[in-house]
Image (spheres, grey):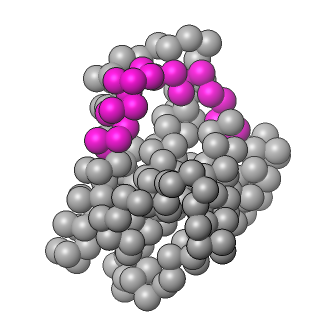
Amino acid sequence: MADTKAEFEHVIGLCREVFKKKMYDYGASWRLMRPESLTDQIFIKARRIRTLEVKKESKVGEGIYPEFMAIANYGVMALIQIELGYADKVDIDETRALELYNHYMDVTTRLMYDKNSDYDEAWRYMRVNSYTDIILTKLERIKQIEDNDGKTLVSEGVDSNFMDIINYSLFGLIKLGDDRG
């Protein structure tokens, strides 16, 4: 598990750096997004990854790696929005946003370590395109739960699905290596 921990810390560090830079550029403007809008934003990124996987080319010169980073970061934003609710104006500064980011990334990675122990690192034997398909499936589940006003009968809630999406994105980043294209 030591390699897994180091690999996770590395890709999380990359995601956190992008998050920090976006906070500098845009502030916490994402606080205005309702959770459903974040679900749709992640859906757009996952669909783009699938399109790039199928077509094997990018017309705008950005590859799969930055899209997985975006999904991980939007997933953390969604978890924050679930806790705080959306805002009508930016209501947190960069320091608070990073505290929340770190908290939810920590909760999410602890979940991954627990599941990883139970599943014996099965993710390492999966194809990256399977991560994409699982993310898209989990997004459909989230949309259904959102359409049901957050109610489920026997299934995990929206937050658990977002944590899984973040972790599958991190798996993708690890499997792809430090390929930013």
Label tally: 0
In the rendered structure, does residue 160 fall within the stretch colored magenta? no
Residue 81: name its quadrant: top right
Q: Residue at x 50, y 76 (%)?
A: 128
Q: Is residue 166 above or below residue 92?
A: below
Query: Looking at the picture, does residue 73 appear above or below residue 117?
Result: above
Quarter of the figure that contains the N terminus = bottom left
Main SS class of the magenta portion in the image: helix
- Percent from the top left, x then y, of residue 31? 54, 24
Residue at the image point whose x is 49% and y is 60% from the top: 63
The answer to whether 21 appears left or right of 57 in the picture is left
Of residues 163 and 153, the one drawn nearer to the viewer in this rendering = 163
Q: Is residue 86 above or below residue 142?
A: above
* Residue 163 in sight in this render: no
Specify whether residue 18 is painted magenta: yes
Whether residue 133 sits left or right of residue 152 in the image: it is left
Q: Residue at x 60, y 21 (%)?
A: 32
The stretch in magenta equals 16-36
Residue 140 drawn at (x, y percent): 74, 58
Q: Tell me if I can see residue 147 in this picture.
A: yes
Residue at the image point whose x is 19% and y is 66% from the top: 6
Name the quadrant containing residue 38: top right
Which residue is at the far right? Answer: 148
Q: Nearer the viewer, residue 88 or 21?
A: 21
Which quadrant of the rendered structure holds the C terminus?
A: bottom left
- Which is nearer the eye, 1 or 56? 56
Considering only vertical position in the picture, is 117 above or below 64?
A: below
The x and y percentages for residue 35 are 64, 36
| Of 50 and 138, the residue lying toward us | 50
